[in-house]
Image (cartoon, rainbow, N blue to C red):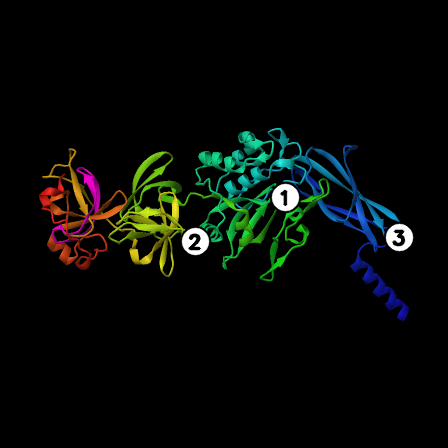
Amino acid sequence: MFRKWGMLLLAAALMIMGPALGEVRVSAKPETAALGENVDILVEAGPGAESVTYTLSRNGGAVFSGEEDSHFAAAFRPREEGEYVLEARVAYADGRTEDGSVTVSVAGRTEEAPGPDRIYSQKDGWWKDKAYAKTELEKSGCAIFTLSHALQRMGWTGEDIIPERLAETYRKCYTKNGTANARLIYQASQAYGYTTDTTLIKSAAVLREGLRSGDLYSFGIVIGHIALMTGIDDAGKMVRVVDSAPSATFERIKKGGVYYLRDGEYVQAQDPGEIPGARYYFETGYYGGLEYYMDLAYCARRGGRLIRPSWLFHMGGGGKIGAVPVEIGIGESVIQVNGKELTVPTRELRWNGEEMPKLAVVTNKRNVLLRDADGKRMGTVPSCSVLPLLREEEDRLYVVYGEKRGFLKKEDTEVAAALEGAMVKAAISVNGNTSGRAKVKMRFGPSEKHRVVDQWKTGTMVTVLAREGEFFQVEARGLRLWVHQDFLTGDGLPTDEDAQAGDDLPTGEVLPTGDDAQTGDDLQKEDDAA
């Protein structure tokens, strides 16, 4: 009785441990594959197995013959059609060896499917014969893979953005010292419409703000190797990284670490194989591409090259279309779509999710400073400017000004929503004439005592926002200003009584008058026409 139970327990233990002595099992998934498809190999051996040696042949001819390897789970990507035989020789601690094999049929080709989550594996064997200038992608293509990863995450699809096509297009970016990454990123920006900067960004605060806003950064993760920053965690401390050749990172990294999430906690990896999704390729002896986390401080020390996706979209009849801003207003905006300028209601635009866009209006009487996340000056923004608002914080607003993104003090601004409903349009005029070369003074507030902010030519089309007494609040050219009624011509302009009753006026904030009035500019309204 005891013997019977003992045999059952031994059998159960052997089942848990794997194959018994004298038996090696090799399995492949899938056993029928296509060119370029990952074929995962699992070698199961008995107790005491120490290493495995892989041999691969196709149609009876040798493809690969390796040396002892410690990885019993591995993969390969077939590059030709045919019948593959994968043999695995297992070496045991006592000096014995045992063999196992599996056959894989390869026909057709796997479909190249670029996508926002695609991670290419530079060292999986597939890129060995793919040319890049005078070298090949497997050896020197990390910057090309990083660019492809970035383009796909920005929504680009098609063959033009897969690595071998990019390598052909930008082969002149390769030098004897490797890829000139700054040149590559700039030249690609001309073709794919993203924003970049020649400055290598090393500010942790600037990188944090950019990543939170959807920016990507190509960066030298270690000496001689390029990867992509794609995001940051909620705490703003750990950067998400996509790496086409993580083994190179682990081999060369100094004063930094690679992390992955386990049960909601960051765990430092000592080997790429620890990271979820890792796949080891026995032909090259390297791990394939991975996504993981790195400390923001480390990434900042290395420095990132900006790749800013299109942030402005027009929600027109053709769906969501990427656009380039020309002038942004509360009522109407001028955008560029496919090289053509369009004037559209701002409510049809999106730049921060799917909600109705919000804007920041500079209400300071003077120009205000635009600063980056470190407080460094980035330039000045004119008084009365209307800017896209990306994010509102306790005492500052994160805005877009031209091609720059930075912060304005909340005390210098107010937040406005895009106008809804019908808009009242008018033209700047002199004596009712909307043609000619005369210019009309546009003021900060609704009186002649307010300073002149700008001068607009007759014929300039404006959106009417509000009325106070004899002055209209209007916007055009990215500014919200006031003009006397004598210099405005249009149908349906509200009367002073309409304004007091609130009839048929667009929603618009009326700027303060009292203490904001300026002295020394008490000109007659007739002088408004220069």
The quadrant in which the N terminus is found is: bottom right
Residue 307 showing in the rendered view = yes
Estimate the spatial distance between the alpha carbons at disc 1 and disc 3, rounded to whole Å: 36 Å
Mark identifier at residue 94: 3
From which residue to which does the magenta span run?
A: 448-470
Q: Residue 505 magenta-drawn?
A: no
Quarter-wise, where is residue 288 in the image? Answer: top right
Ranked by sequence position, the earlier of labels 2 and 3 is 3
Considering depth in this image, is 213 or 503 the residue closer to the camera? 213
The three-letter amino acid code for the residue at tag 3 is Asp
Estimate the spatial distance between the alpha carbons at disc 2 and disc 3, rounded to whole Å: 62 Å
Ranked by sequence position, the earlier of labels 1 and 2 is 1
The three-letter amino acid code for the residue at tag 1 is Ala
Estimate the spatial distance between the alpha carbons at disc 1 and disc 2, rounded to whole Å: 33 Å
Q: Is label 1 or label 3 in front? A: 1
Residue located beneath label 1 in the image:
245
Residue 347 showing in the rendered view = no
- Outermost residue toward the front? 520
Left or right of residue 172: residue 87: right
Residue located beneath label 2 in the image:
374
Q: x, y (%) of residue 76? A: 70, 41
**Rendered position, 410 above or below 68:** below
Left or right of residue 103: residue 275: left
Q: Which secondary structure is most common in the magenta stretch? A: strand
Categorize mark 2 by other alpha carbons within 10 Å: few (<14), some (14-19), many (20+).
few
